[in-house]
């Protein structure tokens, strides 16, 4: 039996994932968490082979949590299940130690297949992620400017480009508006841009939104 733990701050999404996995006789959801502190507590008491981890939750960044899990629970296989398109985060997650990346808008059947694949010790790559990986290997060594952004900086860029105010971003990420403003300033500097309008144009031109 494959023991799965769910970590997502949306109860309805957790229920949908749980119902999907219930169709597989060889998979059992052993615990759920709606935040990273709850995840740490659940890992102390519930056995887990595969963790389905949401990337975009309040508090610590998902990649930071992923790196921490690799140190504290190296045997757990992590599947990232995110709202972000593959071309924004998939390769970052794989490089950080995830065994696979799934978009929440994808086919539910892919979820069962992914859990079984990573349990066998293999990476789960959707056709989109496989293409991204192939492209990254064939590209020249220079990267797009946004590839140099940290996780928080990239989140800030994406949310600003989606039309959100700094106060809204701060609330979603559980950060102070001042901290989010610092991230915005860093993004502008790294991308050689001047204002939010230019950030939005950059994100559109690079297929980030």
Image (cartoon, rainbow, N blue to C red):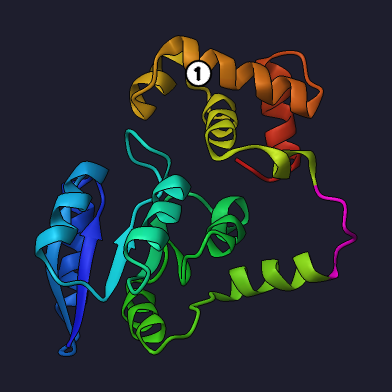
- 27 or 66: which is nearer to us? 66
Q: Which residues are magenta?
A: 138-143
**Residue pictured at 59% horizontal, 76% vertical:** 127
Where does the image place residue 137, in percent across and percent down from the top left?
79, 70
* Residue 138 visible in the snapshot: yes
Pick out the residue farthest to the front.
71
- The quadrant of the rendering that contains the C terminus is top right
Residue 104 visible in the current orientation: no
Q: Nearer the viewer, residue 60 or 111?
A: 60
Quarter holding the N terminus? bottom left
Picture quadrant of residue 185:
top right
Q: Position of residue 177 (x, y in %)?
A: 44, 12
Tell me the SS state at disc 1: helix
Residue that sits furthest to the right in the current view? 140
**Farthest-out residue, top:** 178
User: From the viewer's perspective, is 183 left or right of 197?
Assistant: left
> Residue 74, relative to residue 121: is it above or below?
above
- Relative to 120, is 13 above or below? above
For residue 133, which quarter of the picture?
bottom right
Q: Residue at x 15, y 89 (%)?
A: 25
39 or 136, which lies in front? 39
Check residue 140 for magenta coloring: yes
Answer left or right for 105 relative to 143: left
Is-magenta flag for residue 1? Answer: no
- Give the labeled residue for mark 1: 180
Q: Which residue occupies 40% across, 14% down?
A: 176
Label the magenta part by its dominant secondary structure: loop
């Amino acid at each position: 039996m494959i023991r799965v733990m769910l970590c997502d701050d949306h109860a309805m999404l957790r229920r949908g994932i749980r119902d999907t996995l219930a169709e597989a006789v060889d998979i059992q959801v052993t615990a759920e968490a709606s935040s990273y502190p709850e995840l740490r507590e659940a890992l102390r008491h519930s056995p887990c082979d595969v963790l389905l981890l949401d990337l975009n939750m309040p508090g610590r960044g998902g990649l930071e949590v992923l790196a921490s899990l690799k140190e504290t629970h190296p045997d757990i296989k992590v599947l990232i299940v995110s709202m972000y398109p593959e071309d924004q985060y998939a390769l970052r997650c794989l490089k950080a130690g995830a065994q696979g990346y799934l978009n929440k808008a994808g086919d539910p059947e892919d979820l069962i297949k992914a859990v079984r694949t990573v349990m066998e010790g293999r990476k789960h790559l959707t056709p989109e992620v496989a293409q991204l990986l192939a492209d990254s290997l064939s590209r020249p060594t220079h990267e797009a400017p946004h590839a140099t952004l940290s996780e928080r900086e990239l989140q800030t860029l994406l949310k600003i480009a989606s039309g959100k105010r700094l106060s809204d971003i701060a609330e979603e990420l559980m950060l102070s508006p001042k901290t989010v403003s610092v991230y915005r300033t860093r993004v502008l500097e790294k991308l050689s841009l001047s204002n939010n309008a230019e950030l939005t144009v950059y994100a559109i031109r690079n297929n980030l939104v």
